[in-house]
Image (spheres, helix red, strand yellow):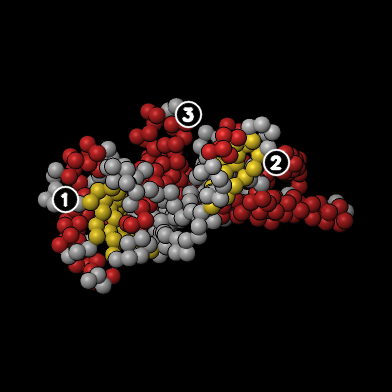
C-alpha cells in the first residue's frame, strides 16, 4: 500500500474514533429526540462496521480501553449503591407488568452489576478477548433495544445506567448506547486479530479477583451504606434554603365579553370587586418559586400537618430514624435505634421517626416500645433515597446533615455525644 494511502487510512480510523468521543460529550446537549443527532450516530455505527477491517492495533486497543473504562465506571457507581439499582429494576418490573420478579430484584441487580464490571476489567486488561467481545456484544444488543423502547415509550424516567452519579434522560441513554456500539464494532469485528497479554492461568486469576472484588464490594455497601454517596441526602449537605425568596403567583383572567386576557400578580388584582369578578373569569395560575428545590420530602403527622421545615431546620441536634416500612425493618437495627431514641429523650435531644407505613402498622410498632417517640409520615420513595437502609439514621443540625448510618452501624448515644459534642 502506498505511503499516502496508508497514512490516510490510519488518519481516517482515528477521525472515526475521535468523532465517537465527541458525540459522547455532545449527548449532554441532546436531552430529547433529535433526528439529526440520531442519524449521525447511526451513520457512525455503520461507518465503524464498514471500516472495521482497516483499523490498526493501536486504534483497536484505544477503543477497547475506552470501553473497558466506561464499563468499569458504570459497574462501580452502581456497585457502590446496589439497593438503588434494585429500586430501578423494581420500577422496570412494575412498568412491564412482571411484578412477580420484584422479590428477585436485588439478586438480579448484583448479578447485572457484577457482569458489567467484570466485562470492563476483561476489556481493559485484554483478557479472554473473544469471549469478552461476545459477552459485551450480547449485552449491548439487549440494552440498546431496551433503551430505544425507553426513549420512545418512557416507561421509567431514568434507567439508572450510571446510578445517581450521572443522570441521563432516556433519549440520552439511547444515544450513549449508540456511541458505545460504534466503539464496540471496532473491538468485536477485530476480535480475531487481538492477542491476549496473559497466559490462561493469569486470565483466570484476573477474572476471579475482579469477580470476588466486585461482589464483596456490593455486599459491603448493602450491609453498611454506599462508600460514595451520590444522593441528594449526602453528609455535609444543607437541606434547607437559607435565604428564602418570596414566591410569586400569577393569575390569568379572561374578559367574558371581549375575550381579552390579562395576567395579575397576586394579590394585586380586584378580587374584592364583585362587579369586576362578574365580567372576568379565572383561566389559569402560574407559580414562580425562585428558591432552589433541594428535595421532595414532605413530613406530616397523622392529621396531615406539615412538619418538614421544623424538623429539617431544627437549630439543635435532630436525630431522624428512617424506615420506609416499619414492619419490615430489621428487628435488631430497630431495637438499637429505639434504645438510642429513649436515650435522646432522656437527654433532651430531638428524635423523630419517619415512615411510609400506614397508621395501623405504626401503632403495632409503638405498642412494643417502652416510650412514645414522635412518628411522622413521608413518601417511601423519598425515604429510600434518604438512606439505603431499613431502618437508617440521620443526624442533622440547623438543616445540615452531620452523618448517616446503616442499622448495622447505629451507635450508642454516648458515642454520638462524644463525636459531635452533643450536650
Q: Is residue 173 visible?
A: no
Q: CA distance from mark 1 to mark 3?
A: 42 Å
The kind of secondary structure element at disc 3 is: loop
Distance between mark 1 and mark 2 Cα atoms: 57 Å
Q: Nearer the viewer, residue 47 or 97?
A: 97
> Where is residue 181, by image quadrant?
top right
For image coordinates 11% across by 50% down, the residue present is: 370
Crowding at mark 1 (Cα within 10 Å: few <14, some 14-19, many 20+): few
Which mark is in front, 1 or 2? 1
**Of label 3 and label 2, which has the lower sequence position?**
2
Residue in view at x 48 percent, y 49 percent: 163
Q: Which residue is mark 2?
A: 34
Residue 185 is situated, as x and y percent measured from the top left of the image, at 67, 43
Q: Secondary structure at mark 2?
A: loop
Frontmost of labels 1 and 3 is 1
Name the residue nearer the viewer: 168 or 212. 168
Along the line of sight, the residue nearer the viewer: 381 or 144: 381
Q: Nearer the viewer, mark 3 or mark 2?
A: 2
Q: Residue beneath label 3, please?
A: 96
Which residue is the extreme one toward the left? 370
- Marks 1 and 2, the one that precedes in the sequence: 2
Residue of label 1:
372
Q: Position of residue 323 (x, y in %)?
A: 29, 47
Vertical order, 308 against 138 (above or below): below
Percent from the top left, x then y, of residue 378?
Answer: 34, 45
Residue at (22% x, 71% y) in the render: 423
Dots 1 and 3: beta carbons under 8 Å? Answer: no
- The answer to whether 228 appears left or right of 358 in the picture is right
The local secondary structure at tag 1 comes to loop
Amino acid at each position: 500500500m502506498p505511503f499516502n494511502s496508508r497514512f490516510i487510512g490510519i488518519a481516517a480510523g482515528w477521525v472515526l474514533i475521535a468523532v465517537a468521543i465527541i458525540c459522547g460529550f455532545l449527548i449532554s446537549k441532546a436531552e430529547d429526540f433529535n433526528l439529526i443527532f440520531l442519524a449521525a450516530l447511526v451513520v457512525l455505527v455503520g461507518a465503524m462496521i464498514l471500516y472495521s477491517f482497516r483499523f490498526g492495533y493501536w486504534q483497536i486497543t484505544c477503543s477497547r480501553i475506552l470501553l473497558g473504562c466506561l464499563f468499569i465506571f458504570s459497574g462501580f457507581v452502581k456497585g457502590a449503591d446496589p439497593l438503588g439499582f434494585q429500586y430501578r429494576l423494581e420500577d422496570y418490573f412494575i412498568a412491564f407488568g412482571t411484578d412477580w420478579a420484584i422479590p428477585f430484584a436485588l439478586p438480579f441487580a448484583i448479578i447485572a452489576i457484577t457482569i458489567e464490571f467484570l466485562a470492563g476489567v476483561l476489556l481493559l486488561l485484554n483478557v479472554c478477548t473473544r469471549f469478552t467481545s461476545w459477552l459485551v456484544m450480547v449485552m449491548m444488543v439487549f440494552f440498546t433495544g431496551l433503551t430505544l423502547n425507553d426513549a420512545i415509550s418512557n416507561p421509567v424516567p431514568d434507567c439508572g445506567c450510571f446510578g445517581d452519579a450521572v443522570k441521563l434522560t432516556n433519549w440520552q441513554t439511547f444515544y450513549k448506547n449508540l456511541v458505545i456500539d460504534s466503539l464496540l464494532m471496532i473491538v468485536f469485528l477485530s476480535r480475531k486479530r487481538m492477542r491476549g497479554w496473559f497466559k490462561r492461568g493469569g486470565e483466570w486469576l484476573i477474572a476471579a479477583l475482579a469477580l470476588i472484588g466486585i461482589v464483596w464490594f456490593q455486599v459491603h455497601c448493602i450491609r453498611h451504606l454506599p462508600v460514595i454517596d451520590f444522593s441528594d441526602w449526602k453528609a455535609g449537605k444543607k437541606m434547607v434554603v437559607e435565604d428564602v425568596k418570596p414566591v410569586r403567583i400569577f393569575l390569568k383572567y379572561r374578559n367574558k365579553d371581549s375575550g381579552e386576557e390579562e395576567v395579575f400578580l397576586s394579590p394585586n388584582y380586584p378580587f374584592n370587586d364583585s362587579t369586576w369578578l362578574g365580567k372576568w373569569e379565572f383561566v389559569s395560575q402560574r407559580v414562580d418559586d425562585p428558591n432552589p428545590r433541594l428535595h421532595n420530602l414532605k413530613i406530616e403527622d397523622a392529621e396531615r400537618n406539615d412538619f418538614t421545615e421544623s424538623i429539617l431546620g431544627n437549630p439543635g441536634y435532630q436525630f431522624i430514624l428512617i424506615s420506609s416500612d416499619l414492619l419490615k425493618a430489621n428487628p435488631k437495627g430497630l431495637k438499637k435505634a429505639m434504645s438510642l431514641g429513649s436515650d435522646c429523650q432522656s437527654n433532651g435531644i430531638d428524635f423523630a421517626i419517619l415512615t411510609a407505613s400506614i397508621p395501623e402498622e405504626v401503632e403495632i410498632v409503638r405498642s412494643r416500645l417502652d416510650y412514645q417517640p414522635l412518628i411522622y409520615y413521608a413518601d417511601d420513595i423519598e425515604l429510600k433515597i434518604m438512606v439505603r437502609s431499613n431502618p437508617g439514621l440521620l443526624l442533622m443540625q440547623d438543616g445540615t446533615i452531620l452523618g448517616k448510618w446503616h442499622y448495622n452501624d447505629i451507635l450508642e448515644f454516648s458515642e454520638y455525644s462524644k463525636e459531635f459534642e452533643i450536650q
